[in-house]
Amino acid sequence: MIVMKFGGSSLADSEKIKNVSEIIKSNLTNKPIAVFSAIGKTTDALLIAGNNALLGEVNIELIRKTHSDVISELSLAPDLVDDLLAELEDLIKEISRVKELTLKEKDYLVSFGERMSVRVVSAYLNSIDVPAKFFDGWDAGFITDSNSTNALVLDESYERIFSNFSHLMKKYEFTPIVTGFIGKDVEGHITTFGRGGSDLTASIIGAALMVDEVQFWKDVAGILTADPKLVGSAKLISKISFDEASEMAYFGAKIMHPRSIVPAMRKNIPVRVKNFFNVEGEGTLIMQKREYGNELVKAISLKKDITLVDIVSTRMLNQIGFTSKVFGVFEEEGLSIDMISTSEVSISLTLDNGKNLGMLLEKLKRLAKVHITKGNAIISLICNIEKSSEILAMVFAELRNKDINVKMISQGASKVNIGLVVDNLQAEEIVKVLHDLFYGGIK
């Protein structure tokens, strides 16, 4: 059994839905469970409709037309999603009446995209003789906490998912078409999972059923050695480990959210990133084991608009509790630290978040001298750390030749990442230079 997740870009119009359906049909021997995002830009359109309702405008015509056009072009029943559109219009009217859009209502609002999507895809699959049934997230087994817009999927969901779908392993009677991104809390309120929520849905289903593989079908060939929009010569990575992929995602690679593969990683289930424009392509396989050929660096990622904080103790050396006090301040302010480098008297760290810095600075100055600089970027080298000396020697020799300075360096605890903090304005050029250094061929 496999899990196949398809995002909104793969459902942008009727032809793409036909293409996705053929992909599913060609994989029936693998007993797929398919997870879907909303059609095209429906989620954005829903949020716009909600915000317009706050201004007194009740209008879902763009959403209605998008789905009616697709349904017509696929020759499906015209009233396929009429009940959901009526429910959506009632919600929009209520938002307009009370002039309020709470986080709970926002979850309810955006859920319509996925809910309509799975009904359309399921109906089309049945029309081409592929037996299919749609499942809203809660019907599939997803139970969450009540943290609206970023809900945590509860552990009991795994058992529910197994109960709902495990029988298909022995007798595959239909293809489940499941909404990504949404579930319900214990009180029955619709919740959403936040960024990467549909990928997370697929990963959780895969972990619950111990499937052979989880597949993320996207509009790219797989995971590349760098952002292809920045480096035209970026190359496809055929295999990468879970921790390498997670580091790439956290430090700027936009192919997936780092938390989305965690459930699969914990169960040692391979995750494959594939291209729905190139069905025969192998894509990138994400697995537990790290594999290195002759390459020193597997990938280079970039995360811009970083704040660098330098903290120097004003007390004597070996001051007990200094580090814990510093980290306590960041916890109080709700700020997450990206990278860190320490000595006996100083701490340098980075934040991807600029809020609360006024209060942060005030609290830190009670403990130490503090200097904060914005406009930085983190360049992450996902690499073979056993050869870190060779890698760093090459990097700094090249940057010295280009008269480029590095503000901070850190080796991640995961042992797969070397991070360099540089100026925002030089960051993209540095990525190109380093990619050319390790792979050749800037375009």
Image: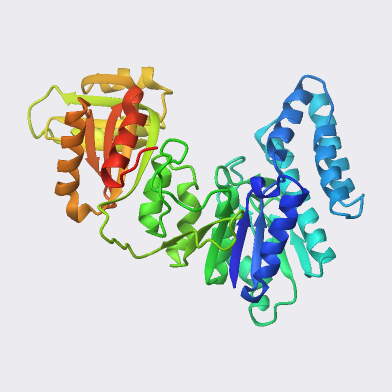
**Foreground of the two, 230 or 153:** 230
The N terminus lies in which quarter of the figure? bottom right
Pick the residue in front: 82 or 336.
Answer: 82
Residue sitting at x 89%, y 54%: 75
> Image height check: is 279 above or below 187?
below
Q: Position of residue 321 (x, y in %)?
A: 19, 36
x then y, percent, for residue 442? 36, 38
| Residue 184 percent location from the top left of the image | 67, 51
Task: Tell me the residue at 91%/54% (across/down).
Answer: 77
**Is 269 left, or right, of 192 in this rendering?**
left
Asked if one can make out residue 207 in the rendered structure from this viewpoint, the answer is: no
Residue 398: quarter of image: top left
| Colour scheme | rainbow
Q: Is residue 291 left or right of residue 220?
A: left
Identify the residue at horizontal 66%, vertical 61% (top origin).
34
Q: In this view, does 154 lie above or below 231?
A: below
Nearer the observer, 250 or 89: 250
Give the residue furthest to the bottom: 170
Q: In this view, does 117 lie above or below 214?
A: above
Q: How many marks?
A: 0
- Choose top left, top right, bottom left or bottom right for residue 202: bottom right
Q: Residue at x 63, y 66 (%)?
A: 161
Residue 272 in view in this figure: yes
- Position of the C terminus by quadrant: top left
